Image: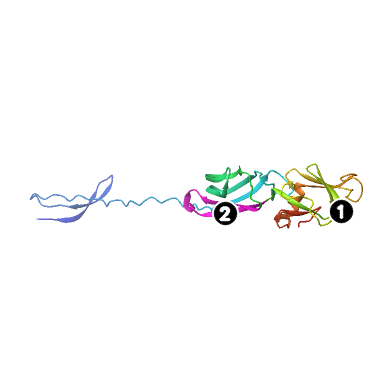
Amino acid sequence: MKRHGLFLIVSPLFIMLAFAQSRGQDGGEKMAFTPPAPTIRPPIPPPTIKRPPPACAIARISPTSADTRLVRNGETIRLNIVIVNGPANGSVSPSSGECSSFTNSSGTFQCNTAPLYRPGENTFTLAVGAAEGNIAGVYSSCSTRVYVSCQRYRVWNNTGFTHDFMLHGRCMYGKINGGEITASPTLLVGIGDTIEQYASSSYTGAACSGPVLRTFPYDAAMSYDSLARGGNGDCLVNFPGPDR
């Protein structure tokens, strides 16, 4: 005979509530209670921190000059590179001297170009991309321009009068207004050269005599002819200016 029931057992010390299920003495067994399996939740991943893409700046810092855009022909320049939101990979185009490519860089650093010989405008472009993280490969760019001078200049008299001029220790006498002072292809104004204008002319006394009225150095020719200063970059200028 099977019995199921709820029994209340009372003692002077405590009251116990029990539920019992019994089976007869015919070999039956009591049923064990199995608790439910615990729920296992996957760990919560940390939040993704997004950072802005890298940005850059590039500029010439040396050698110093009155106009940092002007570069003497054959001169090596130093470029200042700034990278924010790094680290970044990048490259300078055109590659020149130390200024080529870099990896995993940030902050400020410098590089020296090779000597620059191509007259006129020269543009250096820096492209940077994130080296790692959620924006790896995202690119931005910046650039700077410099203007390289001619190796040598031809110069014309623009004083309004006939004068004698000295160049390379040679007297160029009686140069009329509008006439060429230099003599192509050898007697030209190169780096370090200066033309001197004398008070004398072929019509008054000895050639290249009297006081020197004005001088015209290579850098003046470079400045007048440069595209950076409104010139045309054709290596032809007037004494004492402007561009021709």
Q: Residues within 10 Å of mark 2 (few under 14, many from 20)?
A: some
Residue at (53%, 54%) from the top-left corner?
A: 139
Q: Amino acid at mark 2?
A: Ser
- In this view of the protein, which residue sits in the foreground, 17 or 209? 209
Residue at (16%, 56%) from the top-left corner?
A: 4
- In this view of the protein, which residue sits in the foreground, 238 or 144? 238
Residue 42 drawn at (x, y percent): 36, 51
Residue 186 drawn at (x, y percent): 72, 47
Q: Amino acid at mark 1?
A: Thr
Left or right: 38 in relation to 30: right
Instruction: Estimate the spatial distance between the alpha carbons at disc 1 and disc 2, rounded to whole Å.
Output: 53 Å
Residue 10 part of the magenta-drawn span = no
Q: Residues within 10 Å of mark 1 (few under 14, many from 20)?
A: many
Q: Which mark is residue 23?
A: none
User: Which residues lie in the magenta part?
Assistant: 120-147
The N terminus - image quarter:
bottom left
Left or right: 87 in relation to 110: left
- In this view of the protein, which residue sits in the foreground, 76 or 170? 170
Secondary structure of residue under mark 1: loop
Residue 138 part of the magenta-drawn span = yes
Secondary structure of residue under mark 2: strand
Residue 90 drawn at (x, y percent): 53, 49
- Judged by its main secondary structure, the magenta piece is strand
Left or right: 216 in relation to 205: left
Residue 131 drawn at (x, y percent): 49, 48
Q: Which mark is residue 162?
A: 1
- Residue at label 2? 141
